[in-house]
Amino acid sequence: MLFSVLLCNLNAQIKPSNLLPDTTFICAGDSFLIKFTEDQVSKNATYQLNTSYGIIVNTKQFYIKKKGTYSIKIIDGKRTLIDTTYLKFNERPKIRVRDTIICGNPITITANNKNYKYAWSTGETSDQIKIEKPGMYWLKSNNKGCTYIDTFKVSSANAVVPNFGKEILVCENEPNKILSVKAPSDVKLFWNTGANTSSITATKEGLYWVISTSKTCGIRTDSVVIKYKNCDCDVYIPNSFTPNDDDRNDVFSPIFQCDYNYFSLTIFDRWGNTVYTSTNINAKWDGKFKGNPCPDDVYVYRLEAIQKGNDKKLVRNGHISLFR
């Protein structure tokens, strides 16, 4: 009976405590300091740390840096405290960005791990940024509190990125169009006309293209179609009208600046059905088919005309929106 009482008293003195978290996370390569304040235990307390590689005693703080379970026993006067923690590691990011070059157009730099959080020197927090200017930049990667900062340099190099657009209209009375590219001395140019100069003269309608080559930025290319138009006899074609009988924009009618021997206008619905046709250059579509209002929609038109005096043929295809 006396033995039983002594055992109960001993168990009352040994108490599991919350001095340590159940699981401790640190960054790979770091260490964790186990240390207690006098608010937790007295300064005369003794410690014993049990590890997978041995028992450590006679010290009041411990640095642990190996993955595994650690158990500490503290004798503080009449109290015996025990606690356990499991040490785990979070991977430290190693996102590195190479130094790079801007060759005319902005560049996009992307980090290769979407599970991390990012902060760029530009203020962006996504996994990629667009850079338009040369300079020094940095990227901070964060994986659950473990961070890594990498600095990279963006330089600019001589490059030619032509941008003529898809089409250039040239007045018939001024048929020659100069196509020009600003090219540094170390950039080579080649046109489909056979020229290797910085500019050429487009003397006829058709497709023109140029290739630029530099050692640093490689090959760039651009093309454009040259078309002639009669600038003195252009035609204005509205892109919408509202046939609601308010005397404002109630009809669809092209506006011509010259006389034509021949004229034809055909309008189709979205299924290809003809809803209006006329050979009268002064005719106007009121948005009806066989006397019935056509629904609000986008319609397709085809216009053909032959100019009086020079037999120049005009062809226009496009869309017209009907709103009521």
Image (spheres, rainbow, N blue to C red):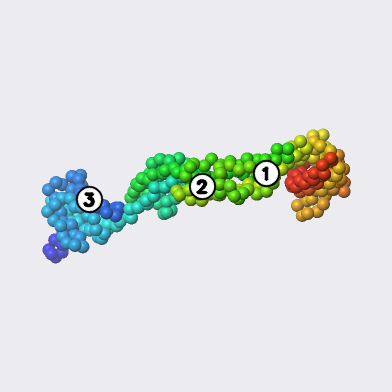
Nearer to the camera, 294 or 251 = 251
- In the rendered structure, are the residues bearing label 1 and label 3 in contact, judged by CB atoms less than 8 Å apart? no
Q: Residue at x 37, y 51 (%)?
A: 96
Q: Which residue is mark 3?
A: 33
Distance from the alpha carbon under mark 1 to that under mark 3: 81 Å
The amino acid at mark 2 is: Lys
1 or 2: tag closer to the N-terminus: 2
Element under disc 2? strand
Distance from the alpha carbon under mark 3 to that under mark 2: 63 Å
Q: Which residue is mark 1?
A: 203
Residue 50 in the image: state x and y as whole percent: 18, 59
- In the rendered structure, are the residues bearing label 1 and label 2 in contact, judged by CB atoms less than 8 Å apart? no
Residue 188 image label: 2
Element under disc 1? loop
Residue 228 in the image: state x and y as whole percent: 71, 43
Q: Residues within 10 Å of mark 1 (few under 14, many from 20)?
A: few
Distance from the alpha carbon under mark 1 to that under mark 2: 23 Å
Does residue 165 show up?
A: yes
Nearer to the camera, 314 or 121 = 314
